[in-house]
Image: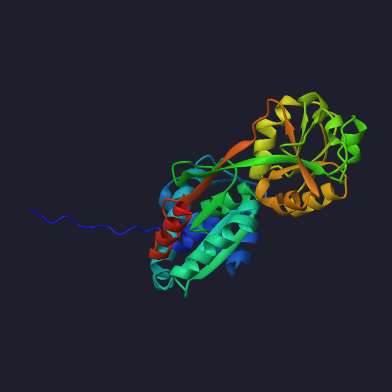
């Protein structure tokens, strides 16, 4: 009986890297700059890959390349192969306690630091790279295998759910808030004096015991709102659980940074809606005050996200244990 002959793949990592770069940048010229190859070498590698696969990956219209329907599934597989090859090539770095962590902005700025302190407490020589952006940008980096694990606020929406693992982590609640004695609340007959001894009980919309304003959806819809930008986990919840009840709400500004929203509300430009983690100190000092809206629940789930092809190193597992325990 003849021994089965093992055939070696004719596709090269260079061809896959060229294809992934073209897919991400949209052109051979930008891919050649990114990979530091000549444009002819990039074009040749793409042609060779299409020949090996016996299928087109791009449709050539003049000088433009349009993605063929074949391109996306090949792109997902190519990413996984390149990620695994990089893991093999740089395994010693992972073994030496290197990890790339992604986080959406609220988590990255307010929740992640104490978790990293615990990680350094267990592994003092840990080598941590951080990427903080909005949820969709962080999930995109996970898909590109640039991040080992991510902690995000919004429901992950990966391009291909088959290669992305997502696990509910913990819950958080967004809070609508205003400057104490805001002119906007005063304009609809709601007022609270900063002097605690003043007769604040005269105002039916202020809950003295809970130290918050209570508004109806209709009242809130008449007030200017400052919200996070589209793509952020915070904005996702605001759209799904708040603004859908107020189609005529006055959203005056979409802002990328939670800190900017907080400071603008402190300047009485409008009302804001952020995680309580962002405004804890200002609530405690009395500079800001919560606004509760009848019938609105702004609870949300935070998520852990990682690529199934990503190598789960010892430090990866240690970090998972820390964040699940904390």
* Residue found at x 77% / y 25%: 216
Return the residue nearer the eye: 71 or 136.
Answer: 136
Position of residue 263 in the picture relative to residue 78 (left or right): right
Image quarter for residue 27?
Answer: bottom right
Indicate the colouring scheme.
Answer: rainbow
Q: Is residue 286 visible?
A: yes
Position of residue 145 in the picture relative to residue 208 (left or right): left
Return the residue nearer the eye: 123 or 97.
Answer: 123
Give residue 212's position: percent from left, percent from top: 75, 37
Position of residue 305 in the picture relative to residue 259 (left or right): left
Q: Is residue 78 visible?
A: no
Height in image: 33 above or below 153? below
- In the picture as drawn, the residue positioned furthest to the bottom comes out as 125
Return the residue nearer the eye: 193 or 49.
Answer: 193
Height in image: 197 above or below 203? below
Image quarter for residue 318?
Answer: bottom left
- In the picture as drawn, the residue positioned furthest to the front comes out as 197
Height in image: 93 above or below 105? below
Give residue 227's position: percent from left, percent from top: 76, 42
Give residue 31's position: percent from left, percent from top: 61, 61
* Residue found at x 43% / y 70%: 90
* Residue found at x 56% / y 57%: 102
Height in image: 140 above or below 41? above
Give residue 141's position: percent from left, percent from top: 56, 54
* Residue found at x 53% / y 64%: 116
């Amino acid at each position: 009986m003849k021994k089965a002959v093992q055939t070696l793949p004719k596709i090269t990592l260079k061809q896959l890297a060229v294809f992934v770069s073209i897919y991400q940048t949209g052109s051979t010229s930008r891919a050649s700059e990114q990979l530091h190859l000549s444009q002819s070498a990039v074009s040749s590698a793409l042609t060779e890959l299409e020949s090996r696969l016996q299928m087109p990956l791009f449709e050539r219209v003049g000088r433009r390349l349009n993605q063929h329907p074949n391109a996306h599934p090949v792109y997902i597989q190519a990413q996984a192969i390149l990620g695994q090859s990089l893991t093999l090539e740089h395994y010693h770095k992972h073994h030496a306690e290197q990890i790339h962590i992604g986080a959406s902005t609220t988590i990255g700025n307010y929740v992640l630091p104490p978790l990293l302190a615990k990680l350094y407490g267990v592994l003092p020589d840990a080598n941590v790279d951080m990427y903080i952006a909005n949820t969709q940008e962080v999930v995109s980096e996970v898909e590109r295998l640039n991040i080992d694990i991510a902690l995000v606020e919004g429901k992950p929406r990966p391009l291909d759910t088959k290669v992305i693992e997502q696990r509910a982590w913990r819950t958080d609640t967004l809070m609508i808030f205003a400057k104490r004695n805001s002119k906007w609340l005063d304009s609809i007959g709601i007022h609270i004096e900063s002097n605690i001894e003043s007769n604040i009980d005269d105002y039916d919309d202020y809950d003295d015991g809970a130290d918050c304003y209570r508004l109806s959806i209709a009242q809130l819809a008449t007030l200017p709102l400052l919200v996070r930008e589209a793509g952020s986990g915070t904005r996702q919840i605001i759209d799904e659980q708040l603004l859908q009840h107020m189609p005529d709400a006055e959203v005056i500004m979409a802002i990328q940074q939670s800190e900017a929203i907080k400071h603008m509300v402190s300047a009485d430009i409008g009302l804001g809606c952020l995680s309580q983690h962002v405004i804890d100190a200002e609530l405690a000092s009395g500079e800001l005050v919560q606004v509760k809206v009848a019938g609105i629940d702004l609870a949300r789930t935070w998520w852990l996200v990682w690529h199934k092809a990503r190598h789960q190193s010892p430090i990866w597992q240690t970090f998972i244990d820390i964040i699940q325990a904390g």
